[in-house]
Image (tube, rainbow, N blue to C red):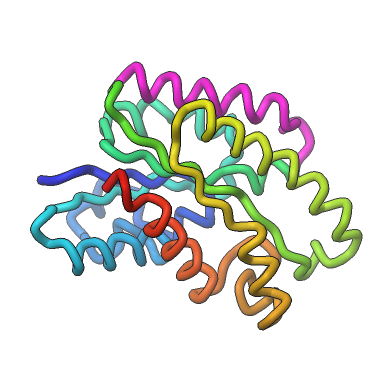
Amino acid sequence: MGKLILFQGDSITDGNRYKDKASEWDLNHQIGHAYPYVIAATLGANHPEKRYAFKNRGVSGNRIAQLFGRWKEDTLLLRPDVLSILIGVNDQAEAGSEPQRFERVYRMLLDEALGANPAVKFVLIEPFLLPVGSYRADWPAHYAKMRQYQEATARVAADYGAVFVPLQRKFLALADEFGAAYWLWDGVHPTEAGHGIIAFEWMERARSIL
């Protein structure tokens, strides 16, 4: 087996994957139908000689505190070579997940991952929003709040030498040209096209560590 690439996050990563132990045999559904599927399909098809292994442990609804709560079982014990994280949209949407705590816990996650495997490489994906659905009303306030979590993610990526995948400016530019709902149907969750954008940006940015 080649490098193990592990995807962590919330519903955007989860992609309705099968989670129960009894279904682990069903390889059609383990990776889900979100951007990890696109990445796994593309890299696996283009580089069979590298024998990449892919696991998805995203869980719908997770904030960073919930991710920390399952970190040992769903990350550390798996010992990934490449650890990809997309988290933050649920933190910005709920009380009690202030940006300072978000950043502090994010650093704890990466410290523990390095303690378990000092050679692990990180890919940190910028959380994102677009003015669709409930986010259309008072969009400047929603965007200003999200910017705090985006900036925290960028700082953590820089401090830990992680690959950083910026997405907000990309989605804003695409929304101006083709409409926001074409990419994020409710302002948060990507359409198939939106997941494609995340996957393509991920593969371009992470190329040097694969």
The question of residue 28 being in magenta is answered with: no
Residue appearing at x 59%, y 57% in the figure: 167
- Tell me if I can see residue 113 in this picture: yes
- Tell me if I can see residue 34 in this picture: no
Q: Can you say which quadrant of the picture contains the N terminus?
A: top left
Q: Position of residue 150 (x, y in %)?
A: 66, 43
Q: Position of residue 79 (x, y in %)?
A: 26, 31
Vertically, is 207 above or below 151?
Answer: below
Residue appearing at x 33%, y 27% in the figure: 76
Question: Toward the viewer: 111 or 19?
Answer: 111
Vertically, is 118 above or below 123?
Answer: above
Furthest residue to the front? 208
Q: Position of residue 5 (x, y in %)?
A: 29, 45
Question: Toward the viewer: 100 or 164?
Answer: 164
Question: Toward the viewer: 64 or 151?
Answer: 151
Vertically, is 158 above or below 89?
Answer: above
Residue appearing at x 55%, y 28% in the figure: 106
Residue appearing at x 18%, y 55% in the figure: 25
Question: Toward the viewer: 14 or 130?
Answer: 130
* Range shown magenta: 94-116
Asked where in the image residue 87 lies, by quadrant, the reply is top right
Furthest residue to the top? 115
